[in-house]
Image (cartoon, rainbow, N blue to C red):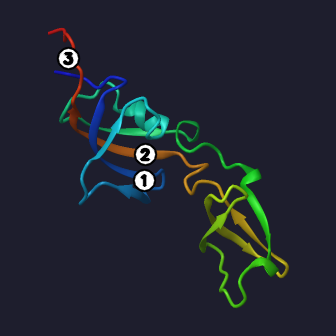
Amino acid sequence: MQQVQSGDTVRVHYHGRLTDGTTFDSSEGRDPLEFQVGSGMVIAGFDNGVMGMSVGDKKTVNIGVEDAYGPKNPEMIIEFPRDQVPEGMPLEKGMRLNLNNSAGQVVPVVITEVRDEAIMLDANHPLAGEDLVFDIELVEIVGAPSRIIMP
């Protein structure tokens, strides 16, 4: 049976959760996720997790911080002056906002603290610093190149 190799385009169903069991993403009720293995389209641990799987295989993959979204970067914590926040805008810890950086790109942030003179914003990926667990089912290897497979 053909096994996933780097460069293959695959379709998978998945259920992603934190180590405490909290679900953060799932393909349930949606089309399978399609990506090219080894291309950087998904986190390294997910890429590595599908390697060697055959169509119909299911497995659970534990992905450490370094192969997921990396550790939280303290340089991504931003102190933003309150006087630059639109007048009357409600501000609460945990609230998600979008900022524009100097290049005009939109950067999603989360309010971590509301102070009198400033708000503290975290621009790290929401899953940075987290170990992740994925249940993966390989649905299809799409257009895989022809290979000689040992019996």
* Residue placed most toward the observer, 99 or 76: 99
Q: Which amino acid does label 2 sit on?
A: Val
**Marks 1,2: beta carbons within 8 A:** yes
| Residue at the (71%, 66%) spot, across then down | 121
For label 2, the residue is 133
Residue 27 location, x and y as percent? Answer: 30, 54
> Contact, CB < 8 Å: mark 3 with mark 1?
no
- What separation in Å lies between label 1 and label 2 (alpha carbons)? 5 Å
The disc labelled 1 sits on which kind of residue?
Answer: Arg
Residue at mark 2 to residue at mark 3: CA–CA distance: 32 Å
Q: In this view, does 99 lie to the left or right of 7?
A: right
Quadrant assignment, res 6: top left
For the N terminus, give its image quadrant: top left
Position of the C terminus, as image quadrant, is top left
Residue 9 placement (x, y as % from top left): 30, 33
Residue named by callout 3: 146
Residue at figure coordinates x 27%, y 42% from the top left: 12
Q: Name the residue under label 1.
A: 17
| Element type where label 3 sits in the image | loop
